[in-house]
Image: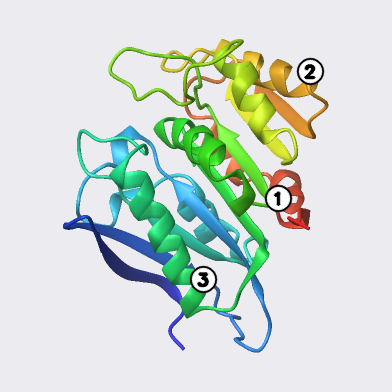
Amino acid sequence: MQTGFLDRSIVHAGTRYPYQVYVPATYDASRSWPGVLFLHGAGERGDDGLLQTTVGIAAAIRRHPERYPAIVVMPQAPRDSFWAGPPGDAALAALERTCAQFNVDTNRVYLTGLSMGGHGCWHIGYHHAERFAALLVICGFVGDRPNRPTVVPPGEGTPYQRMAARLRERPIWIVHGEADSRVPVTESRLMAEALRAVGADVHYTELPGTDHDSWTATYNSESIVRWLFEQRRD
């Protein structure tokens, strides 16, 4: 069985989407493993299948492989796209294929992402909440922004309240840099507040003085990663 970072691709609606799958060196098909779907940010969009492994969870895996005893799926979104619509559907299809190829515990599948990928976590989490045991969302945004897909459909209350109502049964950890100049920290503050208001199991970490890169500290945090793998859907 091949291990390490494996190149893969999937065709969805006539478009090829590259992705990578990380398989731990200790992988043993006789037992089940956690699964992780990681969504990259805007800077890693493309079609080389590699950029999404240069920041975020893949970089942390290379530093601390012992902290990531999991099958990690890392899709790549095309240029000028977001994790809504076909790219998001392709990411879920890559996850499903990977779960079928490896012995993934379907009660321990997690969704995480950074920046544009944080936006994608909220979007995919809203529409597929039942699929994931927990979410780890880093410097994402829920409120409507120019030239960005709407995360939640229109309805009563704020977008944060509608998101919280859908995800209230899912453990969620939100991380954001206090000095983020790209995605306002208020996005995560409002989301955490809305989740607390409905009694959700939510952790919120705000990194003092940190600009947009709040993901390096997050994915290298032993305590946050341990928390993620402790969550079960059942």
As drawn, the residue found furthest toward the front would be 155
Q: Which mark is residue 228?
A: 1
Above or below: residue 149 compared with residue 190: below
User: Mark 2 belongs to which amino acid?
Assistant: Ala
User: Mark 3 belongs to which amino acid?
Assistant: Cys
Name which residue lies at 42% across and 45% down: 55
- Residue 166 lies in quadrant: top right
Q: Secondary structure at mark 1?
A: helix
Q: CA distance from mark 2 to mark 3?
A: 34 Å
Q: Which mark is residue 60?
A: none
Q: Earlier in the sequence, mark 1 or mark 2?
A: 2
Q: Does the rendering let one see residue 53? A: no
Residue 191 is situated, as x and y percent measured from the top left of the image, at: 64, 20
Q: Secondary structure at mark 3?
A: helix
57 left or right of 64?
left
User: Mark 1 belongs to which amino acid?
Assistant: Leu
82 left or right of 47?
right
- Residue 68 lies in quadrant: bottom right
Q: Residues within 10 Å of mark 2 (few under 14, many from 20)?
A: few
Residue that carries the numbered disc 3 in the rendered image: 99
Q: Which mark is residue 197?
A: 2
